[in-house]
Amino acid sequence: MPFVIALGVLVIELTPAHFIYTGPLLVATPALAAVTMGPKGTTSAAALALVISVTTATYNQAWGTLQVYTNFLALALVSLGSFITSSTMQTRRRSELDQVHRIAVAAQEVILRPVPERLGPVRAASLCLAAGTGAQVGGDLYEAVQTRYGVRMIVGDVQGKGLSAMRAVSVALGAFRVVAHCEDELMEVMNHCADALRREAAVPGAYGEEVVMEGFTTALMAQVPDDAVVQLVNRGHPPPLLLHQGRVQALMPSSPQPPLGLEDLITGPPAKPESHPFVPGDRLLLYTDGVIEARNRDNDFFDLREAMDRIGAGTTPAEFLHELHKALIRHTGGRLTDDVAMILVDRLDDEADEADEADEADEADEADEQGGGAAAAALG
């Protein structure tokens, strides 16, 4: 609107209609720009108004009149006040947005707790990055637990953002954390999560009509038993990547299944978990689509396989994810447009397993000795 007004003033002043007094209209352009356009837009509007004032005064040979200098003085005062106002408003809005974003990220971190470094036959690490666009958190979810059936993991992505997405995340994770220890079939664990989301969506007023009609959740579950395999159940989620002897391969499902919430699209017989070799020394990466859909300034997607190939094989799971994080930030220039969640697990061999158990026993003994010494000193 400020630039439209400035253009209108220019047309009036350069035509026979220049007898119309346009000074107040031109002076108002910086004030209008300050409402929504920020300091840069306000400065641009003020500069354009100044150029038009000089041009029209020269064209109409109005230099030397009191009216011209009054208009210039008014334009200068309004421009200065508008710039200060827009700068103050922008600073306040940014501060409020940062505060709300910090609160949202803190709430997300409460729900998405880090996975333990050691789970049965695997070493593990997790990573969760919140997008830097706005204060709404996304719907990424992950969890890894050790059960009597093996290590069970879930990675998923709820459609949408904000409170409704976080509510669905808490429902899915709550169902997984309980049922993962009870059901012996991995497919039944997935079905229980789907049932929990369906029951939650059926609560009157819990979600908007758009979420109820179009909402869905992609999910991937993995189970690492004592055998050298990994069992997968994939419901519309990006396939996990297996790093085996320096080669990265995607574990694609042989019979793709729709996401949770779209069970009406399933027409064939019930799917079963698919098994893939997962031997000692292998690495398995579970991730959300925020990783592979991250773009750079040239609109190129992030090449996750290539990034995994470049990372050294001697890194720990936490170090590996840290290197992936740095590669992702370099690719996007530090501007993530979607949340990112990843779980990485290393399959241990028997020797590494025994060494870890010995280290844990030594640490426990050392802690007991220190505790005993402190107690003795306190009694003394």
Image (cartoon, rainbow, N blue to C red):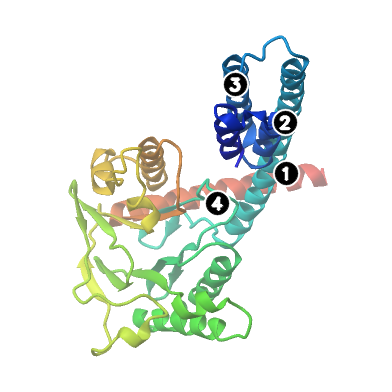
Mark found first going from the N terminus, 4 or 3: 3
What crowding class fits label 4: few (fewer than 14 Cα within 10 Å), some (14-19), or many (20 or more)? few
Q: Is residue 333 left or right of residue 365?
A: left
In the figure, 281 relative to 309: above or below? below
Question: Residue at point 60% right, 65% down?
Answer: 163
- Residue 224 appears in the rendering: no
- In the rendered structure, find residue 82 and report the number of the disc placed on it: 2
Amino acid type of the residue that numbered disc 3 sits on in the rendered structure: Thr
Instruction: Mark 2 vs mark 1: give the one in front.
Output: 2
- In the rendered structure, find residue 317 and report the number of the disc placed on it: none
Q: Is residue 112 left or right of residue 104?
A: left
**Residue under label 3:** 56
- In the rendered structure, find residue 364 and report the number of the disc placed on it: 4
Q: In which quarter of the image is the C terminus?
A: top right
Mark found first going from the N terminus, 3 or 2: 3
Q: Is residue 190 left or right of residue 301?
A: right
**Which one is nearer the viewer's eye here, 85 or 3?**
3
> Do the numbered discs 4 and 1 sit on residues whose CB atoms are within 8 Å?
no
- Disc 3 and disc 2: Cα gap in Å? 23 Å
Indicate the secondary structure of the residue bearing disc 2.
helix
Indicate the secondary structure of the residue bearing disc 3.
helix
Mark found first going from the N terminus, 2 or 4: 2
**Which one is nearer the viewer's eye here, 36 or 3?**
3
> Do the numbered discs 3 and 1 sit on residues whose CB atoms are within 8 Å?
no
Question: Residue at point 63% right, 53% down?
Answer: 106
Indicate the secondary structure of the residue bearing disc 4.
helix
Query: Measured from the top left, where is residue 249 in percent x and y?
Result: 19, 56
Amino acid type of the residue that numbered disc 2 sits on in the rendered structure: Ser
Instruction: Mark 4 vs mark 3: give the one in front.
Output: 3
Q: In which quarter of the image is the N terminus?
A: top right
Question: Residue at point 54% right, 72% down?
Answer: 168
